[in-house]
Structure formats: C-alpha cells, structure tokens
Amino acid sequence: MSKWLTAGVSIISIAVVGYFNVFYQQPQDLNRIQLPLQQDCRVNQQECQVQLTPEQTISLSITPFNAKPMTPLSINLNGTLIDNASITINGINMSMPGFPTTLNAIEKDKYHAETALAICVLGDMLWQADLTITVAGQPYLIPFQFITTTN
C-alpha cells in the first residue's frame, strides 16, 4: 500500500510543479526597471542596500541569517516612498518556482512578510530572491542570489 501512496504523491507533486511552470507567469510591467543581479551582498547573511536613484536607497534582509530550507523566514524591507513590494524566491540549481509574497507596511518606511524556503534534497541549493517594488510610482525588479546548505 505504501508503494502506491508514494507513487501517487510523486505523480501529483510532478503534476503541480509542471502546472505552475507552464501556466504561472508573473505579470510583466513594460515600465519596470530591472536592476542587475546584486552580487556583492548575500541577502540571507546580511542586510543588503540597493541604490535605486541618487536620492533613493532601500535595504532588504532575509532572517534568520543562514536559515535552512523549511525554516520560517522573515523578509524585512526598509525604504521611503514605497507604494508596494513583493518577493518571489525561486530555486535555481533545482527548478523550484516560488510564489510572490506581498510585503506589508508595519510602520513608517518598514515592510515585512513571512515565508519559507521549499524543502530541498540537494545539500547546497542556489536560490534567487526577486524583489518587485514600486517606489514613487516607478516599478523595479531587483534580483538577489544566495545559497543554503543542509549540512
């Protein structure tokens, strides 16, 4: 019986991942500015600052630092003139598309969300956190990459 249950769960899991890979696509904003990959900062190890304009800097962190997959995570964003923000964390070296998580204002210029990384069978997993943010009416996409290890 457990062999059939395992096979059934595996087939359903593959079908769900396939469905979202084919049908789920983030809306494209033609006016959005895509910044380059933020290579100088590991957002799961420290707070990362990004200069959007000469007058506008934001900071993002994912805590607890160096968290493992399936650990509850806090996404923290600081910045002024933020209209809205969301983050999607995708698995890179093992195709694992994430879902957008909306960051909510918790006080003036501070935004927060709760999420978790998906379960992973690889020892080292490369993730990409795509921050989609609108500041003073201008949308931006800011990618960050980080690695988790299960050891």
Image (tube, grey):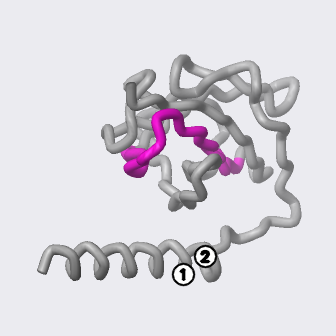
In the picture, measured across the screen, residue 121 lies left or right of residue 129, that is: left
- Magenta includes 118? yes
Disc count in the image? 2
Identify the residue shown where x is 76% and y is 26%: 39
Q: Quadrant of residue 96?
A: bottom right
Q: Quadrant of residue 28?
A: bottom right
Question: Which of the image's four quarters has the N terminus?
Answer: bottom left
Identify the residue shown where x is 38% and y is 49%: 119
In the picture, measured across the screen, residue 38 lies left or right of residue 84, that is: right
Residue 22 vertical position relative to residue 135 in the rendered view, above or below: below
- Which label belongs to residue 19? 1
Disc with the residue nearer the chain's start (2 vs 1)? 1
Identify the residue shown where x is 46% and y is 29%: 149
Residue 33: image location, x then y, percent: 85, 49
Question: Which of the image's four quarters has the C terminus?
Answer: top left
Q: Quadrant of residue 22?
A: bottom right
Residue position marked by numbered label 2 in the rendering: 24
- Which label belongs to residue 104? none
Q: Secondary structure at mark 1?
A: helix
Residue 102: image location, x then y, percent: 49, 54
Q: Determine contact: label 2, label 1, CB under 8 Å.
A: yes
Q: What segment is highlighted magenta in the picture?
A: 114-134
